[in-house]
Image (cartoon, grey):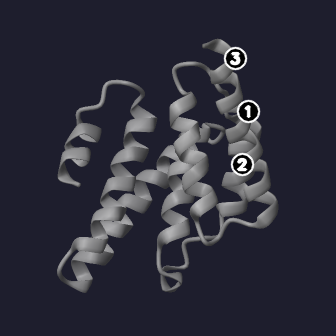
Amino acid sequence: MRYFETAANECTYDETICSAYLGTCKAMRANYASGMFEKLSLFNEGKSLIEKSVATNPLNPEIRFLRYCIQANVPSILFYSSEMEEDFEVIKSNYSISSEDDEFWLKAFQVMIDSERCSDAQKNWLSSKRKEITHGRSNTR
């Protein structure tokens, strides 16, 4: 986990996306922290970075995917799941498939399908997009 956090800190790709990844790492690291204060502190620090990234670039589907993943997996007591539907709609409306990012979206869509909070309608849409990506690959080979 620390490797990904270090990589996110040193990221030179897109500062907003890197910040969202760093926030995701911190929020995930909260699972492995020893005390309740440390867990909550890491989670809140990660959440803050993710939310700042969403506010800076609200239509970026990759950032929305990261927030969706955290919200799909945090305990309900943290009250951090209210934007999942909105994130899904932003992903649905703004993702794009190209040869350089199709592998990311194949995996991202599978993660979303596997989440316990994904509706049947969302799973159907995600599955159809995964098929399109896979079909597109077989047409280019």
| Residue at 61%, 40% in the rendered image | 61
Query: Rounded to the nearest whole Å, what is the CA distance between mark 2 and mark 3?
Result: 20 Å
How busy is the neighbourhood of tag 1: few (under 14 within 10 Å), some, or many (20 plus)? Answer: some
Please, what secondary structure does the residue beneath circle 2 have? helix
Please state which of residues 95 and 127 is positioned toward the viewer in this rendering.
127
Q: Left or right of 100: which side holds 35?
A: left
Label 3 vs 1, first from the N-terminus: 1
Q: Is residue 9 visible?
A: yes
Image-quadrant location for residue 35: bottom left
> Where on the picture, by quarter, is residue 105?
top right
Residue at image position (49%, 44%) is 53
Q: Label 1 belongs to which residue? A: 132
The x, y position of residue 42, in whole percent, is 29, 67
- Which callout, 2 or 1, points to the residue nearer the camera? 1
Mark 3 = which residue?
139
Q: Residue at x 36, y 63 (%)?
A: 27
Helix, strand or loop for disc 3? helix
Q: Nearer the viewer, mark 3 or mark 1?
A: 3
Q: Residues within 10 Å of mark 3 (few under 14, many from 20)?
A: few
Give the vertical position of 9 relative to 136 (above or below). Answer: below
Q: Secondary structure at mark 1?
A: helix
Query: What residue would you read off at disc 2?
Result: 126
Evaluate whether residue 64 shows in this view.
no
